[in-house]
């Protein structure tokens, strides 16, 4: 018989539609939950960043030389001394007006004698000496503030010449052109004065 077939078909179709509706509802429910989860994640406030202030690093300690100012004064006076000597020897003038302002004692007498001898021989000095490795130390036991200056003095470009012609005076080739020079200076009311100027006879 064929009368049961339409009923069975309608029943199967109804079951199929019911299944589709259930699946659709489940899909919608799942999508809704997923959307809410995403919205909740987006709305959730982020944890505040750490605001701990960095610990400041300690400043490096600076070593200060308590004698720095005096050493600077001594070096300035030493430069001035050699500027005056260079000017005096360029004219071989033992009575140069600036000599007595920068040098005294045995150093003054020594330079005046040398200048007088060069003037008598008709000779002067051309060029200027060069200095390097200058070291300043102080004598703690001195009554007046006293400094000792050691210097590598280079006289290779400071040469005696004949005043009349400018011809260089020939000197022994064995003589030292770079040697250790020691100068003693003392602090007077008007500034540092050179007391002694000694060639050590040692190459540098």
Image: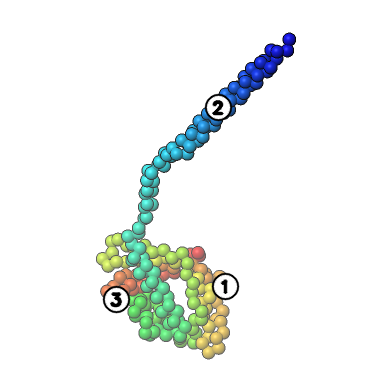
Q: Residues within 10 Å of mark 3 (few under 14, many from 20)?
A: few
Query: Is residue 97 shown left or right of residue 86?
Result: left
Tell me what residue is drawn at x 65 percent, y 19 percent. Answer: 10
Q: Say what secondary structure mark 2 lies in.
A: helix
- What residue appears at the point 31 percent right and 74 percent down from the top-left corner? 191
Q: Which residue is mark 2?
A: 25
Q: Is residue 50 left or right of residue 171?
A: left
Mark 1 and 2 residues: CB-CB less than 8 Å, in contact?
A: no
Q: Which mark is residue 98?
A: none
Residue 123 visible from this viewpoint: yes
What's the image's color scheme? rainbow
Q: Can residue 200 be spotted in the picture?
A: no
N-terminal-most mark, 1 or 2: 2
First along the sequence among labels 1 and 3: 1
Q: Which mark is residue 190?
A: 3
Q: CA distance from mark 1 to mark 3?
A: 41 Å
Residue at 48%, 74% in the rendered image: 129
Q: Is residue 107 above or below residue 123?
A: above
The spot of residue 3 in percent (x, y) is 70, 13
- Pointer 1: what residue? 173
Dot 1 lies on which element?
A: loop
Left or right of 168, for residue 117: left
**Residue 165: percent from left, percent from top:** 55, 88
């Amino acid at each position: 018989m064929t009368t049961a077939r339409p009923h069975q078909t309608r029943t199967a179709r109804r079951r199929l539609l019911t299944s589709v509706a259930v699946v659709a509802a489940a899909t919608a429910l799942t999508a809704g939950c997923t959307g809410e989860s995403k919205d909740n994640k987006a709305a959730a406030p982020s944890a505040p960043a750490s605001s701990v202030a960095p610990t400041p690093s300690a400043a490096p300690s600076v070593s200060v030389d308590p004698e720095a100012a005096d050493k600077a004064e001594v070096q300035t006076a030493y430069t001035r001394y050699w500027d005056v000597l260079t000017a005096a020897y360029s004219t071989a003038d033992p009575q140069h007006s600036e000599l007595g302002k920068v040098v005294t004692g045995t150093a003054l007498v020594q330079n005046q004698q040398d200048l007088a001898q060069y003037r008598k021989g008709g000779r002067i000095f051309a060029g200027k000496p060069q200095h390097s490795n200058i070291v300043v130390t102080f004598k703690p036991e001195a009554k007046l503030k006293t400094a000792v200056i050691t210097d590598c003095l280079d006289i290779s470009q400071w040469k005696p010449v004949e005043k009349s012609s400018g011809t260089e005076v020939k000197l022994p080739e064995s003589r030292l052109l770079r040697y250790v020079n020691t100068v003693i200076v003392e602090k007077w009311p008007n500034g540092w004065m050179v007391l002694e100027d000694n060639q050590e006879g040692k190459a540098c």
